[in-house]
Amino acid sequence: DTEVTQTPKHLVMGMTNKKSLKCEQHMGHRAMYWYKQKAKKPPELMFVYSYEKLSINESVPSRFSPECPNSSLLNLHLHALQPEDSALYLCASSQERQGAAGNTIYFGEGSWLTVV
Amino acid sequence: GESVGLHLPTLSVQEGDNSIINCAYSNSASDYFIWYKQESGKGPQFIIDIRSNMDKRQGQRVTVLLNKTVKHLSLQIAATQPGDSAVYFCAEISGGADGLTFGKGTHLIIQP
């Protein structure tokens, strides 16, 4: 079982809604990530937080807003999404940023998002 | 574009047989490789990793082989079981870079 916990597991939201995805890890990891995965595709990196500071934003639209309240929590705030944003959103964590070889990255089970 | 890819989208093997999943990469600066297993409806699960200064690493029923000369990575699963059915992704990290780069994935189907 993964030690990265994501909630909710499923979310259906309208294009005018504001919602949030939550991620929590208690492994003492200092790097946390958001990935987006469309059906039958590999995960794609969205954001990287290192020591609670945003270090990478892979040109993600501003309707996705990440937040790292503390070293164990990572949120993804969603506003004015489009139907094409429907996907599996994966949170991951690692001891340090991914640039360090041998730095294993652990994924949560994901939040399935449907935008209607 | 992607620097990591896979040769086959689907691989079907008989239960009890060994399976080999292949992955090619193009970035010679890649120095760390990971194999993930993703079951339907779940997140990617870490299986095994290997650094570029190694050419083989073994785990429980799994072996990863790295051939840097031809930029090829493979995952061998011994005595496959029904629970091995999943999509398998290879992923790589280049030194100093952020972000795992994933291959396209191979769907492993175990036939009874």
Image (spheres, rainbow, N blue to C red):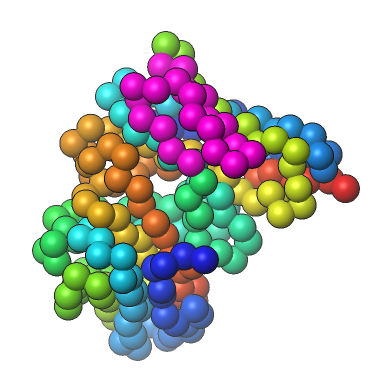
Q: Residue at x 39, y 56 (%)?
A: A106
Magenta stretch: give its range.
B48-68
Q: Main secondary structure of the magenta part?
A: strand
Left or right: B112, with B109 as reference point = right
- Image quadrant where residue B92 sits: top left
State the residue in front, A70 or B9.
A70
Q: In the rendered structure, does residue B53 fall within the stretch colored magenta?
A: yes
Report the quarter where the N terminus of chain B lies: top left
Q: Residue at x 70, y 50 (%)?
A: B85
* The furthest residue to the top: B69
Q: Residue at x 56, y 54 (%)?
A: B38
Instruction: Please state the horizontal and vertical placement of residue A39, each as a whole percent of the image.
Output: 55, 58
* The furthest residue to the right: B112
Instruction: Please state the horizontal and vertical placement of residue A62, each as a whole percent of the image.
Output: 21, 69
Q: Residue at x 21, y 50 (%)?
A: A97
Q: Is residue B82 above or below residue B101?
A: below
Q: Is residue A20 above or below residue B105?
A: below
